Amino acid sequence: MAGQPGFMSLLRSLNHRNYRFFFTGQAVSLIGTWMQQAAMSWLVYRLTNSSMYLGVVGFASQIPIFLFASLAGVYADRHNRHRILVATQVVSLLQACFMALLTFSGIVHVWHIILLSIMLGVVNAFDMPARQSFIIDIVEDKRDLGNAIALNSFIFNGARLIGPSIAGVLIGLAGEGSCFLVNSISFAAIIVALIAMRIPAKAGEPARESFLTGLLDGYRYAFHTAPIRSILMHLAVISFMGMPYGVLMPYFARDVLSGGPHTLGFLMAASGTGALTGTIYLASRRSIRGLDKLIVVASYAFGAGVIVFAFSRSMVLSMGMLLFTGFGLIVQMAACNTILQTIVQEDKRGRVMSLYATAIAGMAPFGSLFSGILAAHIGPPLTLTISGITCALGALYFGFNFRMPGGVHGEGKAQA
């Protein structure tokens, strides 16, 4: 499969039946997820007119990941990841239904959104480690693992391109509630896909040690393995200082570019287009050779894009810079994911990927809260400038300190 020529090599992971179901179900469900994300941001800003509340809601949706993802990683190593994912998708469907009901009834308040965001954050804390670890269970030929991760990022960012664009139109026609309703319906696709898979019975690693011992063992392994530690630290910096640029997007759409929900949709779609381009590039790669250098370059591109976007007053320039940010962000994250999946020991995969989830989504709430408070005092443009500079400095530090483990420069078959 890894030797397929031309365009089909980009899609080689789809030769695996279970991954094909996963890919298709995700492609539909994630469009609804991004529609809800755009609608929720717009709803919060419409209700509060506050950039700080945008940060608070972002914090509420992601702080559970910081608190619980490590615990969920131990759970994912010891239990059936397939069943965990079915359960998380069902609960996410219910959360979207509640959001739709409150919004359509006209009784929605920002505290409702905060509570339901916390609920979704708890679900995601268990979903993310299981989902990241599950990919290797549904790709039989491990040479296709990097391609599968890239295709997973492709559908994520394809939905990021399509979802907000649809949301911008739907919000104008039928209000934010319509986006929440569509999202709830879209979860049926991934739930059906998961049920249709043929997964060999597997209960994960038997519990030979206490839960706490397993948790601490995962921490020791990750932070005593230099390449893993470097990657997690780099992602934490990018997540804390860089990713919150999306939280402040409604401010730039309405108050800087004098637009409405459709403008927000276009800006988010531009970022999604850049990310989509990055995933196509990553899917075309046949080995992990050079991914460490690519992480540094992509981080610089992301930081530079954020800085220029912060002071842009032109819709064309803003969208152009968001292409850079989207490309840089997804390339570095997917590259980090691929390296981690390649070098991690199988019996610690769930725990390491839970730390990956914590570094990305767990640090983001603190970044969202910090950026919201900072933006309220010095303004969103200066806030994003500080973010971009910090991300560039983080890339410089990573470049000087990261070294690929010996034996993993080829097709990614080596173990840590």
Image (spheres, helix red, strand yellow):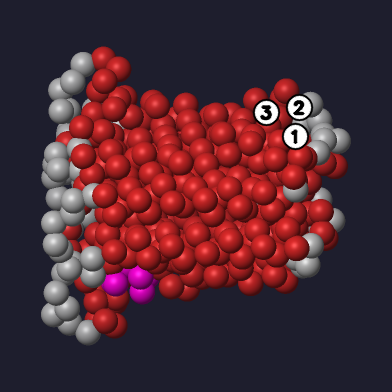
What residue sits right under mark 1 in the picture? 263
Whether residue 130 is visible to the viewer of this picture, yes or no, is yes
Q: Quadrant of residue 408?
A: top left
75, above or below 335, in the image: below
Query: Is 209 covered by the magenta stretch?
Result: no
Whether residue 382 is visible to the viewer of this picture, yes or no, is no
Mark 2 vs 3: CB contact within 8 A: yes
The majority secondary structure of the magenta stretch comes to: helix
What residue sits right under mark 3 in the picture? 319
In this rendered view, identify the residue nearer to me: 188 or 372: 188
Q: CA distance from mark 1 to mark 2?
A: 9 Å
Q: Amino acid at mark 3?
A: Met
Q: Quadrant of the N terminus?
A: top left
Mark 1 vs 2: CB contact within 8 A: yes
What residue sits right under mark 2 in the picture? 315
- The image shows residue 397 at horizontal and vertical percentages of 45, 47
**In the image, is 314 to the left or to the right of 79?**
right
Q: CA distance from mark 1 to mark 3?
A: 10 Å
405, above or below 226, in the image: above
The span shown in magenta is 70-75
